[in-house]
Amino acid sequence: MDYYLDRVTFTLSNVKGSTISKLKGTTKGDYPIKLKHPPLGSPEGYPSYQIITVNGITDIIEHRRQEPVFYIPDDPSVWSELGIRQ
């Protein structure tokens, strides 16, 4: 996943590094988006969120710390606080 201002690109590659699929979408709001009450024990500034839309489907990307891993949260309270309907 790569962010470019208000754009996001997801690239799916095989084990040899060849691109299988590439999807482009848009981001919503300022980045990073933070929760008012982050989980206890979270690193400073995390988790952070980005709201994205790809092919008409909106989802949330969660970064739990500075690393090349991201998560897709399904917690209704996160969706609600970010103002997104599931």
Image: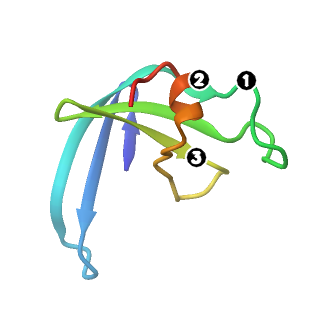
Please indicate whether residue 11 sits to the left or right of residue 65 in the image. Answer: left
Please indicate whether residue 34 sits to the left or right of residue 74 in the image. Answer: right
Instruction: Specify few, some or many for label 1: CA neighbours under 10 Å numbering under 14, 14-19, or 20 or more.
Output: few
Label 2 sits on residue: 81
Q: How many marks?
A: 3
Q: Position of residue 75 (x, y in %)?
A: 54, 42
Mark 3: amino acid: His
Secondary structure state at the residue bearing disc 1: loop
Instruction: Specify few, some or many for label 3: CA neighbours under 10 Å numbering under 14, 14-19, or 20 or more.
Output: many
Residue drawn at 52 percent across, 59 percent down:
69
Secondary structure state at the residue bearing disc 3: strand
Q: Position of residue 29 (x, y in %)?
A: 46, 17
Q: Are marks 1 and 2 in contact (CB under 8 Å)?
A: yes
Q: Nearer the viewer, residue 50 or 15?
A: 50
Please indicate whether residue 56 sits to the left or right of residue 7 in the image. Answer: left
Residue drawn at 40 percent across, 21 percent down:
28
Label 3 sits on residue: 63
Instruction: Specify few, some or many for label 2: CA neighbours under 10 Å numbering under 14, 14-19, or 20 or more.
Output: few
Quick check: 45 above or below 19?
above
Q: Nearer the viewer, residue 33 or 35?
A: 35
The residues tagged by marks 2 and 3 sit, at their Cα atoms, a distance apart of 16 Å
